[in-house]
Amino acid sequence: MIHVLTIHWKSAEWIDIQLKYLKENLNQPFRVYAFLNDVPNVEEHKNKFFYYNTEDIKSHPIKLNLLADIAGFAAENDNDYLMFLDGDAFPINSLDDLFINTMENYPLAAVQRLENNDDIQPHPCFCGWKVSVWNGVCGDWAHGGITW
């Protein structure tokens, strides 16, 4: 199972696009967990997600950590996958082989934003790991929360 964790903020513009492309490009079973903060007409979108939260939490890392905790609790086992994906990001081609094969051979697959002062921290615009790895490193998106 792949647990997709995303945050939509102040716009519903990307919700249906993201969900459409996930359905088209993930053949593995998946669930989408989302924060929907200040999304206009949020009632129209809540039921599109396995889990949603509209609590007004300001910190992006805290929201990501909470989604990871909730997905970890909902996971069928520690070999399930967590896929962090920005609200305006979506796959344009099949992710199954690439994602699953990468996760079988590496503990982490992610975008790295070296343009951010050579930051070595993976970027949550796209990041994936098994639940067991996230839990094993005490995953935390807060700056300085863990050593990458």
Image: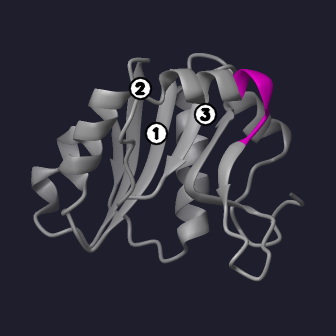
Task: Tell me the kind of residue under disc 3.
Answer: Gly
Task: Tell me the kind of residue under disc 2.
Answer: Phe
Which badge, 1 or 2, is on the more N-terminal residue? 1
Which badge, 3 or 1, is on the more N-terminal residue? 1
Q: Helix or strand or loop: what does disc 1 sit on?
A: strand
Image: magenta residue range: 103-108
Who's the residue at 58% across and 29% down the image?
A: 99
Mark 3 and mark 1: span between their CA atoms? 11 Å
**Viewport quadrant of the C terminus:** bottom right
Asked if the residue at tag 3 contacts the one at tag 2, i.e. Cβ–Cβ closer than 8 Å, the answer is no
**Pointer 2 residue:** 30
Task: Tell me the kind of residue under disc 1.
Answer: Val
On residue 72, which mark appears? 3
Task: Give yes or no for residue 127 being in the magenta stretch.
Answer: no
Q: Helix or strand or loop: what does disc 2 sit on?
A: strand
Q: Determine if residue 49 is in view.
A: no
Instruction: State which mark lies toward you, 2 or 3.
Output: 2
In the picture shown, does residue 101 fall above or below 17?
A: above
Mark 1 neighbour density, 10 Å: few (under 14) some (14–19) many (20 or more): many
Which badge, 2 or 3, is on the more N-terminal residue? 2
Who's the residue at 53% across and 36% down the image?
A: 71
